[in-house]
């Protein structure tokens, strides 16, 4: 596989990483219909842990089968598939070498009152299963945020030493953050930036809203006239906050909703310079044919065709 100039430029932003890490980032960047473009669309399926099996899979029962998700990501020509240990173990053999996988190393569940996650896999698991990257969630703002940051510090060090890439889901919540503040643009940019500082290669955040949560930050946004009135402008601000574009940033899809609303949002993310999207429920909760059509249109957006 030869990499494109675009991918070579992206990899040059990761200038201290070893060849193993770069090769795994290249694998993800060269996979599927977006291969070589520098854009990514990833399928994440950890919602069984986060929300439970019925809420996640009852809308489309074939999705109870772990093989369904490997196959969906592959058929749709996506860049990678991310899931917790058990889901990856249940399909890694059949699909070995066909689609890059991201082992989600920690998970929350809806039965806990804590804004925290348990570490549920190891770097050795990721290597054994042929994964290209580890994935880890932090909850900036929560009472457990520092412990989570220390966990990813250790895991990222081990993963990078083993040549694996590191993807961080940075989801502000808990503590003194208001519900609105969880997706406020100042908080989203702050959370994305902290994930970069923690050494993430790919950062995953939710699309930011126009809200501003922190008074001290709000003053700067006003005084410096940082544009936050459109989603494209807010996306550009988040990308800038990720080392001025030297780190890849992907945006999550959220709860299942109408197709045109989702696609319009993704067009704005693209226009703001997002690396791509990571879309779970909106994909696997639709019947397979509808999901393939939707993912095809999302990929077309990042190809600049729609
Ligand atoms: P979705 O596209 O289904 O929102 O998936 C993205 C994701 O980050 C999942 O990886 C995760 O399970 C889920 O969102 C968490 O959603 P929430 O934090 O809203 O419960």
Image (spheres, grey):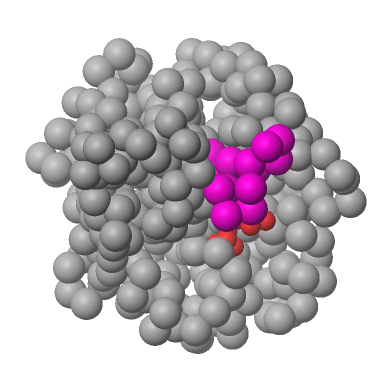
As rendered, which of 128 and 168 lies closer to the eye?
A: 168
**Regarding ligand 1, which quadrant of the image does it lie in?**
bottom right
Query: Residue 154 vs residue 56: left or right?
Result: left
At horizontal 72% and vertical 68% (from top left) the residue drawn is 56
Main SS, magenta region, reads loop
Instruction: Return the x and y of residue 1 as percentages of the image width and height.
Output: 23, 42
- Residue 180, magenta (yes or no): yes
At horizontal 22% and vertical 37% (from top left) the residue drawn is 224
- Residue 198, magenta (yes or no): no
Instruction: Return the x and y of residue 144 as percentages of the image width and height.
Output: 73, 27
At horizontal 77% and vertical 78% (from top left) the residue drawn is 58
285 versus 70 height, above or below = below
Q: Which image quarter holds the C terminus?
A: bottom left
Q: Is residue 280 visible?
A: no
172 versus 56 height, above or below = above
Range drawn in magenta: 169-182
**For residue 189, what is the image quadrant?**
top left
At horizontal 15% and vertical 34% (from top left) the residue drawn is 9
Instruction: Return the x and y of residue 33 as percentages of the image width and height.
Output: 29, 63
Instruction: Return the x and y of residue 149 as percentages of the image width and height.
Output: 61, 22
Toward the left, the furthest residue is 5
As rendered, which of 285 and 241 lies closer to the eye?
A: 241
Query: Residue 189 vs residue 225: left or right?
Result: right
């Amino acid at each position: 596989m030869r990499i494109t100039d675009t991918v070579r430029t992206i990899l040059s932003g990761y200038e201290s990483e070893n060849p193993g890490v770069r090769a795994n980032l290249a694998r993800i960047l060269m996979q599927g219909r977006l291969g070589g473009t520098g854009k990514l669309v990833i399928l994440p399926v950890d919602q069984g842990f986060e929300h439970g099996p019925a809420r996640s899979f009852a809308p489309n029962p074939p999705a109870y089968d772990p093989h369904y998700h490997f196959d969906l990501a592959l058929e749709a020509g996506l860049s990678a598939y991310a899931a917790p240990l058990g889901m990856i173990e249940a399909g890694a053999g059949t699909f070995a070498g066909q689609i890059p996988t991201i082992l989600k190393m920690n998970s929350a569940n809806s039965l806990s009152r804590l804004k925290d996650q348990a570490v549920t896999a190891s770097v050795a698991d990721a290597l054994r299963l042929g994964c290209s990257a580890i994935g880890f969630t932090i909850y900036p703002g929560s009472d457990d945020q520092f412990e989570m940051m220390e966990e990813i510090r250790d895991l990222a060090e081990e993963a990078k030493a083993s040549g694996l890439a590191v993807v961080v889901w940075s989801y502000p919540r808990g503590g003194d953050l208001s519900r609105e503040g969880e997706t406020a643009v100042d908080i989203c940019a702050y959370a994305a930036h902290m994930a970069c500082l923690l050494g993430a290669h790919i950062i995953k955040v939710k699309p930011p809203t126009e809200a501003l949560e922190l008074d001290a930050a709000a003053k700067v946004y006003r005084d410096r006239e940082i544009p936050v009135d459109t989603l494209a402008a807010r996306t550009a601000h988040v990308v800038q906050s990720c080392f001025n574009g030297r780190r890849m940033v992907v945006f999550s899809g959220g709860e299942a909703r109408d197709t045109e609303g989702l696609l319009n949002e993704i067009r704005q993310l693209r226009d703001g310079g997002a690396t791509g999207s990571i879309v779970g429920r909106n994909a696997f909760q639709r019947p397979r044919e509808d999901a393939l059509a939707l993912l095809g249109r999302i990929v077309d957006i990042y190809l600049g065709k729609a």
